[in-house]
Image (tube, rainbow, N blue to C red):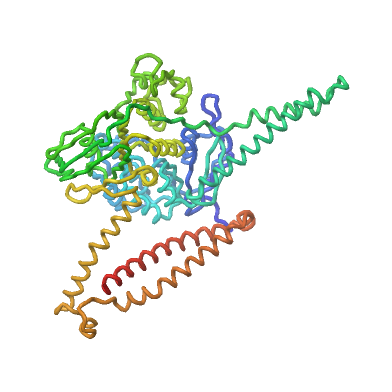
Amino acid sequence: MAPPPLLRLDGVRLTFGGTPLLTDVELNVLPGDRIALVGRNGSGKSTALKIAAGMVEADGGEVFRKPGATVRYLPQEPDFGDFRTVGAYVAAGLGPADDPYRVTFCLEALGLSEGADPAHLSGGEARRAALARTLAPEPDIILLDEPTNHLDLPTIEWLEEELRSLKSAIVVISHDRRFLENVTRATVWLDRGTTRRLDQGFGGFEAWRDKLLEEEERDLQKLDRKIVREEHWLRYGVTARRTRNQRRLEALHTLRQDRRDARRSVGQVQMAAGETRESGKLVIEAKHIAKAYDGRTLVDDFSTRILRGDRIGFVGPNGAGKSTLLKMLIGQIEPDSGSIRTGTNLDLAFLDQKRAALRDDTSVSDALTEGHGDQLIVNGEPRHVVSYLKDFLFSPEQIRTPVGNLSGGERARLLLAKTLASPANLLVLDEPTNDLDMETLDLLQELIAGYPGTVLLVSHDRDFLDRTVTSTITPAENGRWIEYAGGYSDMLAQRRGEARQALKPTAAKSEGAATGAGRSDATRSSGSGSAKLSFKQKFALENLPKEIARLEKEIAKAEGEMADPTLFSKKPDRFQALVKTIEASRAALAKAEDEWLELEMLRAEMEG
């Protein structure tokens, strides 16, 4: 029997300004749940989360919270009130039974000082402080609204591990696919005011969503055909008598109303980059460039050649110097030493992560045209600002809206519209994924993949990098930067290979030193100077293939049982148990394969 829920939304409704935002929202949160709440920007995800947290009152439906259950909500824009230090702000979120040490632990992990003044924090630092306040108490329910925004990759990976270690139930909104895949076990899709639930993590969501949309489209086509048949009967099927069949006529009116009420999925962003002349084959060449600030070396002896058509990703911790290196390469900052040569016919478009190109007091239209009327030139042709903004999901009523009144996602789309309208063959994107929904990210990925020019991209979104870049530049130690072929996952694989190669000579030296005379007992007995695997390593090498085969068989058996389409409806507990079994077996399989590969490489090197 399933435990009682900690939190439940049942048939929740909410209307803003006469327009229904939420019409039938259901959310059931059990102890230990890990739920992804997904949907388009503007679909009401954040509002639904605020209703769950008790911060917004619903117009109708039921909101239940288990008596005594503690709930913590991470807002997109934290309010520090009158707190004088970050430590005091975070500690104020603790309950009487919570561990005060958690304040120090979370702040140190997120790179913040307890004594820092909240008034002097940057936007990203403010988000990390709010995240520390949310996680420090270890509440029963954690509601996270875009927790990875403005976090660097090491911090995102720490957050994943922290969330996996907590006993709290978690509901999270995020555009970061890899993050959602790593932390969730169920997905709730909020679409056109209603919710649908998939009892799988985000990894299975997109295929499930696409299947539902295809079925919905087929149903609408059937409804259209039925309306046509009924209209034909109404016009031609009763010519022999003047009295209409009123019941059938009423049924036709009902069908027409159903068709009007069948709201299709909201429109897609139409995205295309402004075209210009072709650049030269060489775009940027840097030789031995270096840059230091306040005695700290950010870039040291870095060289690269960027050619037309390259898509280069820059990754690394905040403060490592990604933006500094990028701005040196495009000529916005002079290097302290070394040289940079740029190619011919370069036209640059730059998207700044700080959104500095947008002023809060200007209207959406003026931000796009810089106050020069209501027309702009896109790909050499004039476009009316309303028509162009529709491509980015802005309504005609929004063109006079001040930029300061836009949501984070709307500001991100407006800046993309402004950047992509500029004719360019060198596209520089600094954190373009912040606040974008997944559908917009998909289109941006397609645009970058098919872009005829050159792209320089700074991002902490691992999935986005894997789908877009041809090589990845990342920091090493003491200001060194290394370029790897492929995306983020390719970079990690190459670094692991480098680490193994670096560890092997060290391990051999350590083994030799431990024997005193430079040889182990096993080496002496064989008369050979080469090292040998230990008994434990030999045993593992012989038995890991059997373990790998067993895990593969276990996964295949569980997946075969889950293939039964009636399993979830008939035996939901068995379905959930199989999901957990497959997740655990896949993790064990990956670990066993890595261990076997490392031992096999070590054995081959010793024997060689």
Is 545 above or below relative to 74? below
Along the line of sight, the residue nearer the viewer: 76 or 160: 160
Along the line of sight, the residue nearer the viewer: 436 or 3: 436
Q: Quadrant of the C terminus?
A: bottom left
Farthest bottom residue?
525
Q: Is residue 276 visible?
A: yes
Q: Could you tell me residue 42's position as x and y percent?
A: 47, 32
Seen at 75% across and 30% down, the residue is 229
Q: Quadrant of the N terminus?
A: bottom right
Q: Could you tell me residue 61's position as x and y percent?
A: 58, 37
Q: Is residue 435 visible?
A: no
Which quadrant of the view contains residue 547? Answer: bottom left
Along the line of sight, the residue nearer the viewer: 226 or 147: 226
Is 486 above or below relative to 410? below
Q: Could you tell me residue 22's position as x and y percent?
A: 54, 34
User: Horizontally, is 249 left or right of 352 in the view?
Assistant: right
Farthest right residue?
240
Q: Could you tell me residue 75's position as x and y percent?
A: 39, 38
Which quadrant of the view contains residue 275? Answer: top left
Is 537 above or below relative to 263? below
Farthest front residue?
281
Which quadrant of the view contains residue 410? Answer: top left
How many numbered badges does the structure rendering display?
0
